[in-house]
Structure formats: C-alpha cells, structure tokens
Amino acid sequence: MQISDPTPAGHPALNERTQHLLKFLVERYIRDGQPVGSRTLSRDAGLDLSSATVRNVMADLEELGYLRAPHTSAGRVPTARGYRFFIDTLLRVKPLDSREIEVLRRRIDQPTQSGTELARSVSDLLSGVTRLAGIVMLPRRQTMTLRQVEFLPLSEHRVLAILVLNGQEVQNRIIQTRRPYDAAELQRAANYLNAQFGGRDIQQVRKTLLDELRETRDHLDRLMQTVMEMAEQTFETAPESDDYVVAGQTHLMQYADLSDLDKLRQLFEAFNQKSDLLHLFDQCLHAGGVQIFVGEESGCGVLEGCSVVTAPYGSGDQVLGVLGIIGPTRMAYDRVIPVVDVTARLLAEVLDGQRD
Amino acid sequence: MQISDPTPAGHPALNERTQHLLKFLVERYIRDGQPVGSRTLSRDAGLDLSSATVRNVMADLEELGYLRAPHTSAGRVPTARGYRFFIDTLLRVKPLDSREIEVLRRRIDQPTQSGTELARSVSDLLSGVTRLAGIVMLPRRQTMTLRQVEFLPLSEHRVLAILVLNGQEVQNRIIQTRRPYDAAELQRAANYLNAQFGGRDIQQVRKTLLDELRETRDHLDRLMQTVMEMAEQTFETAPESDDYVVAGQTHLMQYADLSDLDKLRQLFEAFNQKSDLLHLFDQCLHAGGVQIFVGEESGCGVLEGCSVVTAPYGSGDQVLGVLGIIGPTRMAYDRVIPVVDVTARLLAEVLDGQRD
DNA sequence: TATTAGCACTCCTCACCTCAGAGTGCCAAC
DNA sequence: GTTGGCACTCTGAGGTGAGGAGTGCTAATA
C-alpha cells in the first residue's frame, strides 16, 4: 500500500524519543478522546522518563505545531499537522488477516443489477466495517466500454436508447427526435453502431462519431443521418448519473468530536450537495493509492474536524472511480486505511470478473 | 380537502371559550416554541379574561389531557392529544393562492427521465417549501401500465428485459435463463406479450400469465414456453425498487424540539431502514385525502416528537403512491397541510399528462 | 548537558448557593 | 362564574469555592 500525502510540508527531524512520545500521544488520544498529559506519557509510554522531561518534549512539539493544549491545564491534543506527521511517518498499519479479507470479498462479490447498486452495497460495507460514513464514486460513464446499443421507438418523436456497458451495466435514455423513425430504421442504426463501436469505450465512440462526422453531416446518407441523430443524444455526457453514493452518515452523529449540530448539518448538506466532495474525490482519482486528508487539508471548510481516507479502484489498468470513508479526525487510521485499501482492490477484482 | 384522523378518539365537548383559548395557545406555541402562560393568554387572546380565569380553564384542559406543564412554573404546552384536537376541529387552513400554486406546478412539471427522478424532484420541492423533510413514495410497480416489453440477449444465459411503463418509465432487469435464446425467439416472445398485454397493468399481466398458465406449463408450445420463462422473472415483484425518496432531512436538525442527537440519529436511521415508514405510508394509500399523524400516533417509536403529514396521489382514479412531509410536532400545520395537499394534486395532474 | 524533583500557578469542573422571574394553585371576595 | 391576592414552586443565570489535573520554571543532580 502506498499512502501519499496530498499536501507535503517540510517536517524538521525529530529524534527517536520525541517521535515515540508523539506516536504514543496520538494513539492514546485516538483511543480515549481525552487530552493526554505528561504524567500519563511518563507512566505508560514505556520510556522511563519523568513527567518533567516529557513536559519539555511536549513543549517542543507544541512549538513545532504538532500538538496544542485546549487550555493551560489540560494535557495535549494532536493538531492536523500532528496527525499528518503521525500518518506519514509514525503509523504502522495493521494488515487485515485473510479471514477478514474473505468476508469483505464475499460481501462485495454479490450479484447486482447495476453499478449503482454495487456502489451502494460497497459503501454500506465500508460504513458498516468502519462505523464511519462510506462513500463510493460511481465509474465515469465515459470510461465504460460499450457492449451493445439498442433503440426502441416509444412514440412519434421519442425513442428509448438502451446502452449495455461493461457487460453488466444498463443505462436508458429517452431521446427526443426531430422526425419519426420506424423500428427497422432504428434497428439498422443500432446494428451499425454495434458493429462499428462495440467493445470501445464511450469516450472514443463519442469522439469518433461526433467530432469527426459532425462536419460532414450534410453529405451523409440516410442511415448515417439516423445514426448521428441517435448518437448525439445517446452519447452526450450524462448529467443524470448520481456521481457518488454515501452510506452510514448517521454513524458520524455518534462522535463527540462532531457533536455540534450546526457543523453536522453543514456536513450532511455537503453530502447532498455533492459538488465539493466530488471535487475532492476527483483529485484522488490518479493518486495511485490510499490518500488521506486530515481536517481542512482538503480545502473543504465543512470537513473541519473530519478526515477523509480514499483509494482509487480500477478494472484492468484503468482507474474507474474512488471510494473511501469520512469520519472524525480522531479515527483509528491503522484499521481504516487497510479496510479502504483492500476494499478498493476487491472491488476492482469483482469488476474485472464481470467483464465477460 | 379532507383531513382524516387515523386514530379517532372521543373528545368531550368544550365550550367556545375553552376552544378559543386552546386554539390560541397551540398557535402561540407553534409560533414561539415557548410554553404559554396564563398571563400571555389573558393579555393576547382577545377574550378580556383575567389570568386567574384562564388558569382555571388551563387546569381543566390539562385534566382532559390536551395540555401539560413541563414543570410547575412554566406555562403549558400542547400534548399529542391537544394537537390532535387542534388539527381536527380548531385549525383553519390557509389555502395557497394561485400564484404559489403556479410556482409549484412549474417546479413539478419538468421533463424527467424516470419516476425516481420525478419523485426526487418533488420531495426536494416539498422539503424546500416547508423546510421540513419531504418524502415521496414511488408508484408501486404493480399498479403501472405495461406499454412495451423487449428482450435483449446479453450472453448465453443472460437476457436483458426492458419494460416501458406508463409511457415514461423504463425499467431493466437482467434475467438468468435456463437455456440460450436467440434474438428471433426473444422477439417473438416480446411480440406476443406486447400484443396480449400492452395497456394492462403489471398486476393483471402477472396474474394472468403466471397463475393461469403455470399449471399447464407442460402442454405449452415452444413460443409459450419462452414467454413463460421470460415473464416469470420479468414480472416478479421487484425487490430492487427504491420504495421512497427523502429530501431535506437536514432541515430537521434545525428544530430545537429535535435537538437530541441520539433521537435524531434514530430518526435518520429510520429514513434509511425504510420498512417502518413504508408501513406507515401504506396505511395512507387509501385514505382519500390528507392524513396527519401526531407524535407517536403513527405507532412508530422513532417518530416521537415528530408529525407526519401525508396525501395519496394518483393518476386518473387510481392511487399510485403517497407523498408527504415529516417535521417536528410543532410545525405550521395551516401552511404545511395545503402544501402537501396541492403537491399531491399537481403531481397527479402531471402524471396524467404523461400518459400519452 | 540532559534529566529530574519541587513548587507556584492556571484553568477547568463540579457542586452548591442565591436570587429574580415566571407561573401556578387556591382561597376568599365580588 | 369571575377575579384579585398570595403563598408556593421551579427554572435559569450568575457567583463562589474546593479539588484536581496539568503546566512552566527553577534549582539541584548525575
């Protein structure tokens, strides 16, 4: 697994003892949710240091911006920068054992009727296993392979276009036509498209058909005119698709860190709005591994107090989408990161298997 | 409009003065959210009574279970029973003016690709206008009219069934077949089904085909065998459909009445679970008008502190589904009720218009 | 020079108190 | 039946003080 830092920032060298203390403090804070004091560290961190010494170290770490004290006498808490350093250099991830992986695999590899359904089930899985909010971005339509296209006349000026993609996914679109078409005409257009473009991805189809032929439209024969009118609306980028699927938002209401109702409301609205989060996920598409945003690193104001862990998933060597979780900054990264990572891999496997 | 009481209960006769005071108290409480005291009523209710008199009346109303006092010195608050009486006999609903109706109509009558999309947009509308959570139950598949059915071979043992319903709605299902079928065979089966059952509702189709023919299966010719295998899976009740669509849940986080995070979590989980709410809405399908559940009248524990206002909508004389809102018990019924009522009517109109 | 014990200090939390304000119930008078 | 008056109750805001946790600093120590 490769964890890349979206916002690399220089970290001054810390000696081993300091790192150990920081690591212990972050872990303890993640476990208990309470500010950690020097006495606790002196006693439990296993370094045989007096609390006074620990205090000196903590003061240094606060100076460097890794820790902060909620108030004078309250111990220390990691800052976003502290979490960042923790994740990048201190964290040892616990790999899932094969039994857990098998459970995940079985839950993902269930027969589904559509990509949306699969995405829903995977985000359910993510949220169930991590007790956080799970998110799965749907594969971009543009990257899907065209298996088959059919046209069905519905009424005088309406034709139903049916796209079978990736051998599993079916999409419909109702097309408004300029003139009536009969079934035979539509059949011929579909045959042509299937013969010419079956097996290619939508992006290519669109490019070839529209960009290359549009100019010569006036010189096309009747068949190709039909093909063009159908294709134009059929292969346009779909504004309909749901972009991503969220599950388990309610989990986020359990964490004291996010108990501010107003903040929570804004967060939930961001889930519905989608645009901000989509932008964030787009950045992760080509990260090539697990990516983590701590707090406001994402540049998204509503994500204050939250962290996002994402991983792209793909079929073959192509990136199809991104999945991940959103939870309080104070989350069990050592567990969540492998879950996200493995889920992405398993989803890729399943999608590969479906390409029959 | 007809507002029916789902749980009629005897209400003793109240004299006019008492009713007036109760009405004023409920309205004031809905407006301000504060317990209403005798002084306020004496001063503002326009009855020229001393607070002592009002206190006597309030004591009676408390005795009858219409009011309760949060504590000794805090004025009174309506109980569920109080709201019930208010809604049934005291409430004067403010009809929407034609301008408002026009705005609603335009927002509903937008071109949509599918029933789900339409439902989503209507529940968005409901939640936007009322600032509560809007819910639209999707039309039961069983009640839809079959326009057209087509079968598309996908691979050896997989056939894509495409159902065009109500002239607007398209549904797909992938069917696993026992033996391979070629395109011509499937075409004949589709032709048969379209000829025999086009224009009938799914319920009928299913009944006729499955119940009547299943027994005689062994004596059917090859065409009918094909028809049967296709139809069995195509017309089975769909477990896939999303049942209902919720919008604007986040609005509910703004109301102090529901500010208990844990309660709120349970409520949101009920939205996702769906089964409880579906059961509730099913009851409203044949109510023939606006129906209101106050607090736990619905029999649904998580709805404590909430009211539900629903109205069935239909096309022609057939009930297709239910829509409504969920909000805090303390909501502006005089405004919400007509909004729900009119929205249901407008949705029916639009659906009627689409039956081309 | 790094570590430590000791100590004064800060700040939070909690329990407790008080007090004003709002509202009630009841009673006697009208 | 209605009303004024009065004692009573309860809440909520504000204040106080003890206890505890944790810090920073300093001087002593290894």
Image (cartoon, coloured by chain):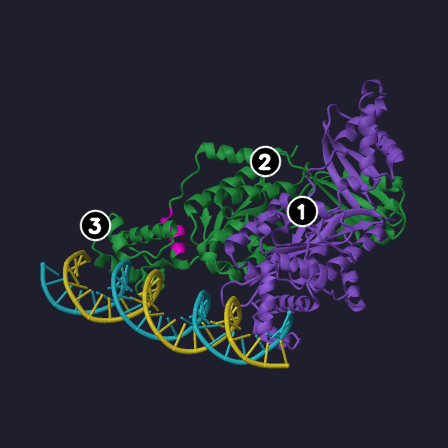
Chain colours: A purple, B green, C cyan, D yellow
Q: Position of residue A134 (x, y in %)?
A: 67, 56
Between A298 and B55, the one nearer to me in the picture: A298
Categorize mark 2 by other alpha carbons within 10 Å: few (<14), some (14-19), many (20+).
some
Instruction: Chain letter for mark 3, please.
Output: B
- The location of residue B153, given as percent across then percent down, is 86, 43
Q: Which residue is mark 3?
A: B48
Circles 3 and 2 on the same subunit: yes
Do tag 2 and tag 1 residues touch (Cβ < 8 Å)? no
Of the image marks 3 and 2, the number of the one nearer the N terminus: 3
Relative vertical location of residue A324 with respect to residue A22 in this rendering, above or below: above
Residue behind mark 1: A280
Task: Report the residue at 23% width, 49% height from top.
Answer: B47
> In the rendered view of the protein, which quadrant contains the N terminus of chain A?
bottom right
Picture layout, residue C6 above or below residue A103: below
Name which residue type carries label 2: Val
* Magenta stretch: includes residue A289: no
SS at badge 3:
loop
The structure residue drawn at horizontal position 38% and vertical position 44%, both measured from the top left corner, is: B92
The label shown at residue B350 is 2
Question: Which range of residues does the magenta coloring cover?
Answer: B83-91
Q: Left of A203 or right of it: where is A283?
A: left
